[in-house]
Amino acid sequence: MALSYRLTTLERLKTALGLPASTSDDPKLDALVDAATVAIENYCDNGFVTRSYSEYSRAGINGHQGGARRIFLRRYPIQSVASITEAPSGTIPATDYLIYGDEGYLEHVSYWPAPDDRWTIAYTAGRFASTTAVDEALRLACHMLVEDWKRKPDGPVSSTSSAQRSQSFTEADMPQRVKLVLEPYRSRL
């Protein structure tokens, strides 16, 4: 099953690479698109197609619990926050903080309280509403990475999941031409 947050579609990839509409390589190409999406998101340290995330925070300063004004989330822009909870303490009301979505942080109206352990923050983030809305530069980077892997007999596709395929993919493995396209998309953290 294809990822719901891919950076391109199989059809667009095949058009970009000049491949026929239907080939026996379709399952492998599908897996390569998923693996390239995961590798690009890992390289940029951000997700791109809007989806739900869950993160933990102690909202602390220098490793101490509580006392900070801002919580920076890994994925941005933040579209919405579903909840900030900690069992058994409860929930932080949405009226206690502001969302600075484009900057990727939540700011408490005074200071974040200290949780007993850590807050679980459930939120939605992403630059693009769907795969079809992904901008051309990100789509191009995905196409180039798939093209590069397709040429290599030992590419990232195996019988494991897409996330596992790209998990061991490092920055050094990213082709320079793809890095150049992705530079503006790298995370600020």
Image: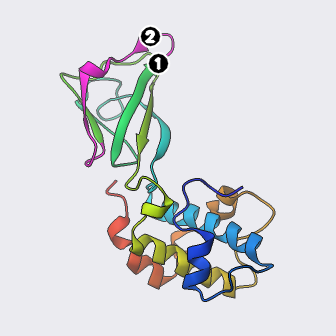
Q: Residues within 10 Å of mark 1 (few under 14, many from 20)?
A: some
Q: Are marks 1 and 2 in contact (CB under 8 Å)?
A: yes
Q: Where does the N terminus fall, quadrant-wise?
A: bottom right
Q: Is residue 9 left or right of residue 177?
A: right
Q: Nearer the viewer, residue 51 or 62?
A: 51
> What residue sits right under mark 2 in the picture?
89
Label 1 sits on what residue type? Glu
Q: CA distance from mark 1 to mark 2?
A: 5 Å
Identify the residue at the far left of this view.
Answer: 110
Label 2 sits on what residue type? Ser
Residue 52 point in image, percent of width and height: 49, 40
Q: Is residue 142 left or right of residue 95?
A: right
Range drawn in magenta:
86-104
Q: Residue 86 bears which disc, if any?
A: 1
Q: Is residue 28 left or right of residue 46?
A: right
Q: Residues within 10 Å of mark 2 (few under 14, many from 20)?
A: few
Q: Residue at x 69, y 74 (%)?
A: 29
Give the secondary structure at mark 2: loop
Q: Nearer the viewer, residue 175 or 150?
A: 150
Q: Residue at x 43, y 70 (%)?
A: 138
Magenta highlight on residue 96 = yes
